[in-house]
Image: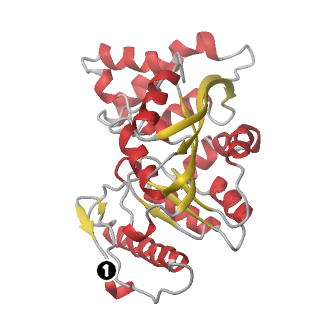
């Protein structure tokens, strides 16, 4: 069976792999074999990225997997992810896609839950995160922009659930594109289970970044990488894409920042995104300014930092593809 492999942008170049990496398809509609082909494809892309490193230093990594694991391990901690995994309720034999799989910690839990008779696929835009996810034991993961997912047509309408944790608030450019991708992947009646930054997420830090950037003559609204919608806004978006909203809530959560405090958080999540247009010296000055402003409300007398997260958590069902 022929298969059309997607193109993936690598720096300033495009790579496409085709029949030379095909393997035979058999079994239930060839679905498992298609995922194996997909995984081979991903590994070739990763090898290409390594080979291009000396020629083109741009890539899809806005931060490194090691820095992410060191500074933001709370993102995938059992304490913070138990509610969304409980809402997903993965079961033996299910086929589940993880949007924004990162380094794969939650993907692995889902992979274990669905067992040998099911399968999971992780998708992330950051090539370093995908590489680490594969090394961590995720069987199938690949690189793609969630706002414009490139998938083989044979895999459309074949998944029981799309799952996402702490990823979709990065999809500011085209949030509807994310839903269109989920819709293409899901079976009729499939579920979309997500937790992301919602309205008032990171309050205090965000306005401080806006103020510091604007004071230097820039337009912060154009540089701000985050999309933190209200319940009403995202519910309308889901419904317009053909989803029935089962539950949707904003959940405030005080989030301690033990490793590096606010400065470490800004270096990880803002330096190569919000502040990517600035030199290292300029970015350091902005971070100093933001840390100084936010210390009034976010740092206790012992020097411990806490950030106010507000999570948009929802379960939606696809009525028809």
Q: Which quarter shows the N terminus?
A: bottom left
Residue 142 placement (x, y as % from top left):
46, 64
Residue 120 placement (x, y as % from top left):
59, 64
Q: Residue at x 65, y 55 (%)?
A: 105
Q: Residues within 10 Å of mark 1 (few under 14, many from 20)?
A: few
Q: Is residue 268 visible?
A: no
284 or 109: nearer the viewer: 109
Farthest residue toward the top? 296
Q: Element under label 1? A: loop
294 or 75: nearer the viewer: 75
Residue 309 placement (x, y as % from top left):
61, 25
Q: Residue at x 32, y 67 (%)?
A: 6
Q: Is residue 95 visible?
A: yes
- Place residue 177 in its image quadrant: top left
Residue 98 placement (x, y as % from top left):
55, 54
Say how the picture is coloured.
Answer: secondary structure
Q: Height in image: 118 above or below 238?
A: below
224 or 84: nearer the viewer: 84
What residue would you read off at disc 1?
18
Q: Residue at x 29, y 72 (%)?
A: 16
238 or 50: nearer the viewer: 238
The tally of labels here is 1
Q: Residue at x 46, y 90 (%)?
A: 24
Q: Height in image: 160 above or below 135?
A: above
């Amino acid at each position: 069976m022929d298969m059309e492999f997607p193109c993936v942008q690598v720096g300033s170049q495009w790579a496409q792999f085709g029949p030379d990496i095909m393997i035979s398809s058999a079994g239930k509609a060839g679905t498992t074999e298609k995922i194996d082909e997909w995984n081979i494809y991903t590994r070739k892309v990763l090898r290409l990225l390594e080979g291009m490193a000396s020629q083109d230093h741009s890539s899809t990594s806005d931060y490194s997997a090691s820095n992410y694991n060191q500074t933001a391990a709370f993102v995938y901690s059992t304490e913070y992810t138990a509610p969304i995994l409980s809402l997903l309720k993965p079961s033996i034999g299910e086929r589940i896609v993880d949007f924004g799989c990162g380094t794969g910690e939650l993907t692995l839990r889902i992979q274990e839950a669905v067992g040998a008779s099911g399968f999971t696929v992780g998708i992330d835009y950051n090539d370093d995160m995908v590489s680490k996810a594969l090394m961590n034991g995720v069987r199938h993961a690949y690189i793609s922009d969630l706002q414009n997912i490139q998938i083989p047509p044979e895999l459309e309408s074949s998944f029981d659930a799309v799952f996402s944790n702490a990823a979709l608030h990065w999809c500011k450019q085209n949030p509807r594109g994310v839903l269109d991708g989920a819709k293409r992947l899901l079976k009729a009646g499939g579920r979309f289970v997500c937790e992301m930054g919602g309205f008032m997420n990171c309050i205090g830090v965000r306005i401080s970044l806006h103020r510091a950037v604007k004071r230097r003559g820039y337009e912060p609204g154009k540089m701000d990488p985050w999309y933190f919608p209200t319940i009403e806004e995202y519910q309308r978006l889901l419904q317009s894409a053909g989803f029935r909203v089962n539950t949707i809530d904003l959940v405030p959560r005080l989030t301690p920042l033990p490793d590096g405090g606010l400065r470490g958080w800004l270096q990880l999540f803002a330096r190569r995104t919000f502040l990517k247009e600035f030199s290292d010296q300029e970015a350091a000055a902005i971070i100093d300014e933001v840390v100084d402003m936010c210390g009034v409300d976010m740092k206790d007398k012992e020097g411990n930092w806490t950030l106010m997260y507000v999570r948009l958590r929802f379960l939606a069902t696809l009525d028809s593809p």
